[in-house]
Image: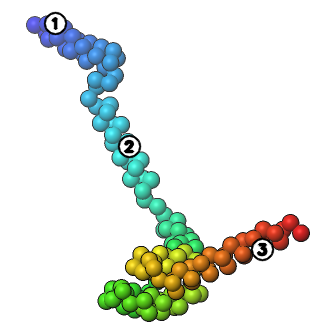
Amino acid sequence: MPTTAMKGQKKKTKTSSSSSSANPTTDSTSPKREQNKKKEESTNNSVKPIEEVLTVEERLKRESFFLITHDDIPYEEDLLRDQYNIKSWLRYLYHKQNANRESKIFIYERALKVFPGSYKLWKQVMQKKTTFFLYIIYFLNEGSY
């Protein structure tokens, strides 16, 4: 009897080894291992050191990607109360006169959506654009002399 049990065990090992060597994709453990490896790699990549996070925040502050700052909150609240008051928009734009170009464009676009026919707003937008293009032309021509 021990000989028959051993033969059966050998058959089982042969069938399992033959199936895994013949078709490796049918092995149920290999895809799970690959998935676990991918999960471990993704978790390792998503965790960043504190130094990298701080440098990104500093870079964002330096490049001024924040279009609405804490100083703008009273103006934004005023616009929430009455967005159809052109004086509120003009006060807000006056407040942002020393801000970066992107934040001013952001406010001008919002104001022009509310007042598409406002002469004052369009005149200011066109003046800003012409001065910007004049500066570009000046600096481009400055290098050619």
Q: Quarter holding the C terminus?
A: bottom right
Dot 3, crowdedness within 10 Å: few (<14), some or many (≥20)? few
Type of amino acid at the residue the image marks with label 2: Lys
Q: Earlier in the sequence, mark 1 or mark 2?
A: 1
Q: Residue at x 30, y 14 (%)?
A: 18
Which tag is nearer the camera, tag 1 or tag 2?
2
Secondary structure, mark 3, is: helix
User: Eyeballing the image, is 143 above or below 72?
Assistant: above
- Whichever of callouts 3 and 2 sits on the residue coming sooner in the sequence is 2
Q: Is residue 108 visible?
A: yes
Q: Residue at x 53, y 68 (%)?
A: 56
**Considering depth in this image, is 23 or 103 the residue closer to the camera?**
103
Mark 3–mark 2 distance (CA, rounded to whole Å)? 54 Å
Q: Is residue 91 left or right of residue 83?
A: right
Q: CA distance from mark 3 to mark 1?
A: 97 Å
Residue at image point 68% right, 73% down: 133
Q: Earlier in the sequence, mark 3 or mark 1?
A: 1
Task: Find residue 131 and report its horizontal and vertical position in percent.
Answer: 67, 79
Question: Residue drawn 52% across and 86% down?
Answer: 120
Foreground disc of the pair 3, 2: 3
Secondary structure of the residue carrying numbered label 1: helix
Q: Are marks 3 and 2 in contact (CB under 8 Å)?
A: no
Which residue position is annotated with label 2?
A: 38
The amino acid marked with disc number 3 is Tyr
The residue tagged with tag 2: helix, strand or loop? Answer: helix
Residue 72 at x, y = what percent? 44, 87
Q: Separation of disc 1 and disc 2 at Cα? A: 45 Å
Residue located farthest toward the left when viewing the structure as drawn: 1
Which residue is label 1 attached to?
A: 3
What is the quadrant of residue 88 in the picture? bottom left
Residue 56: image tag = none
Q: Which residue is mark 3?
A: 138
